[in-house]
Image (spheres, grey):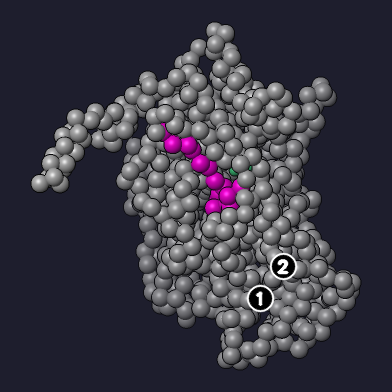
Amino acid sequence: MTMCFCATVLTVGIQAQDVSIYLDESKPLEQRVEDALGRMTLEEKVAVIHAQSKFCSPGVARLGIPEVWMTDGPHGIRPEVLWDEWDQAGWTNDSCIAYPALTCLAATWNPEMSLLYGKSIGEEARYRNKTVLLGPGVNIYRSPLNGRNFEYMGEDPYLAARMVVPYIQGVQQNGVAACVKHYALNNQEVNRHTTNVIVDDRALREIYLPAFKAAVQEGKAWSIMGAYNLYKDQHACHNQYLLNDILKKEWGFDGVVVSDWGGTHNTEEAIHYGLDMEFGSWTNGLSNGASNAYDNYYLAQPYLKLIKEGKVGTAELDDKVRRVLRLIFRTSMNRQRPYGSLCSEAHVDAACRIGQEGIVLLQNRNQVLPIDLTSVQRIAVVGENALKMMTVGGGSSSVKVKYELSPLEGIRRRVAGKAEVVYARGYVGDPTGEYNGVKSGQDLTETRSAEELVAEAVELAKTADYVIFVGGLNKSAQQDCEDSDRQSLELPYDQDTLIEALAAANPRLVVVNISGNAVAMPWVDRVPAVLQTWYLGTEAGNALASVLVGDVNPSGHLPFTFPAKLEDVGAHALGEYPGVPRQDGSGLVDERYNESIFVGYRWADRQKKVKPLFAFGHGLSYTAFEYGKVRIDRKEMKADETITLTVPVTNVGQRAGAEVVQLYIRDVKSTLPRPVKELKGFRKIMLAPGETQEVSFVIDSESLRYYHDGQQKWVAEPGKFEAVVAASATDIRGKASFMLME
Ligand code: BGC
């Protein structure tokens, strides 16, 4: 009896309770936002738009609105850090799966891999209770010296756009916001806080913005991170042109603009020029007399003071807060969001598959690869990168992994019982291994001289059936690392000498280049096989071994050009890299992108005499593909019509394999100069031996357009066009001409 009575009282209590609109998920988002906004005090509003710790901003505790927790990104979930420090907090439950670096993801040319990547890393972020994942990055690969290219998706705006959208969708399915970075024109690390980029509107619109636009309009990213550099003399984190005019007004972005850490410089500009949330401002020297250095952020007390003195109104503040509330309702206040998972078997599998699909077989003379384990007794593995942990270092993308399987260990495991594996270090690169308190735990100290190391490796190479040299760059300063750029295109640590010596010692040499950037290969004619394997994360060793022995047929293709030398890159031939310091005492550095739209293959295509070492889109397979005749369904189209192009592709080899069929468009005659051709479509297809598939592309007038800076709009100029079907930017397999009619 008593129980029954209680239940009745309880039901009546709940019914009588008034559910506030902002808490009612059945109400439209904007209504909830307005309701919450209306309940907040001025102080509460100012509080939610800036950090309260390294990676966290306050919610509204009084209203049950939670804090916002950010995390790097973009290759794994960063370990927890101390409240006001970069150093890891030393938790024992924050190890993650490291996914392959974004260059590798782009090299898969497979949007399904992007979705899998986003979904998997999003699940880890969700499990770790993060609101925002700081990634992915889509800054265009302009120079092979950029220390952060490994975190981005290559040199082509179309490829980057197609690959970024599913990543975002995968992350956000988990109720975790993606934060696309670094918007915009952050194409180098040297002088990253002081470089004022001077770029024409065509290059801005055609090269540097499309991936961000796709991220916002198609991926529906809930947040975006401003870049450190300046554009039109304003820092990108508070920039009238990039943030207010283009991102918010033109593209209709309704999410949050987050500053890069320390990218905010001025309260007035931050108020008026589009920044919504301030993070990572340097607190040194700002904290005098304040209880908390965060109160002194540009968008904290200084903002409140201006409002209280009546010097600025609250319209901008309300807009910022609305955006923050929208973000919170979409993420942590979405009761339907899944719970996520960490280091699951599915995540390990995803990391491995993405790595396998992204590895690029650059060269394979005499079919040296794959290694036939039935006829091999001894494999010599040489090189520091065969055992060096690559997930520690490189800057903010550094992680604390559950484990990282090295190339050497992966090869050992795969060939166990079939062949003996011997190892020689060969060279010493970077024996350190610590980032923000996360230690690799490896002791890579070496006392022998360079000559002794080479001699040992060569002796070993002579005794082996195969030599696998694993070298390249690493994640230390001036390599593939944030906050500095490389000093040259050459491989560091005199690896070229070692490679030449190994090539002379054994004809079955495979060079495995681990990097996120192109490197010079002066020895390329003397080395039969070259693999580009990126930073593969947790499953590095397994992914590499599976390709070496042919369990997996490589199908990665380059997302950027490998130039033969630095001067073959537009940014270096014409551009002002790394910029020209101003003489006005401002400390700013102007950098003109004189090469304009001619970035990557767009530049290489124009050069009559120089050929790239390996072209954009290049990637071999253990099988071969033949392209049949290109057909188009009509020869003429109007602006509102489309043309369908079809090409049959056949696997003419003995193994199943995947090919990336690429479609480039060439504008035969145009008023303004245009690239020789531009990527406008690609499809990755899997073919059994002997199988043929017809691949179709629909060409619409959008693929024919360029940005007319005089008219400030996109223009598709009537006239003759060519559809170019290719296996890389220099391996053209078929063409068809058509007309765009008035
Ligand atoms: C990087 C960002 C990163 C942030 C937080 C900055 O130095 O540029 O990419 O997300 O730090 O770690």
Q: Nearer the viewer, residue 472 or 699?
A: 472
What residue lies at 48% left-to-right and 51% top-to-bottom? 128
Q: How many marks?
A: 2
Name the image quarter holding the C terminus. top left
Tell me the residue that label 1 is attached to.
408
Report which quarter residue 231 is drawn in.
Answer: top right
Q: Nearer the viewer, residue 618 or 292?
A: 292
Q: Which residues are magenta?
A: 65-81
Give the alpha-carbon distance from disc 1 to disc 2, as whole Å: 14 Å
Where does residue 418 sit, x and y in percent of width and height?
59, 90
Please give the label number shown on residue 442. Answer: 2
Q: Based on the picture, tell me whether residue 248 belongs to the magenta stretch.
A: no
Please give the label number shown on residue 678. Answer: none
Q: Is residue 255 above or below residue 550?
A: above
Q: Secondary structure at mark 1?
A: helix
Q: Secondary structure at mark 2?
A: loop
What residue type is disc 1 on? Leu
Q: Nearer the viewer, residue 407 or 515?
A: 407
What residue type is disc 2 on? Gln
What residue lies at 57% left-to-right and 47% top-to-bottom? 72
Residue furthest toward the left?
1
Q: Is residue 423 visible?
A: yes
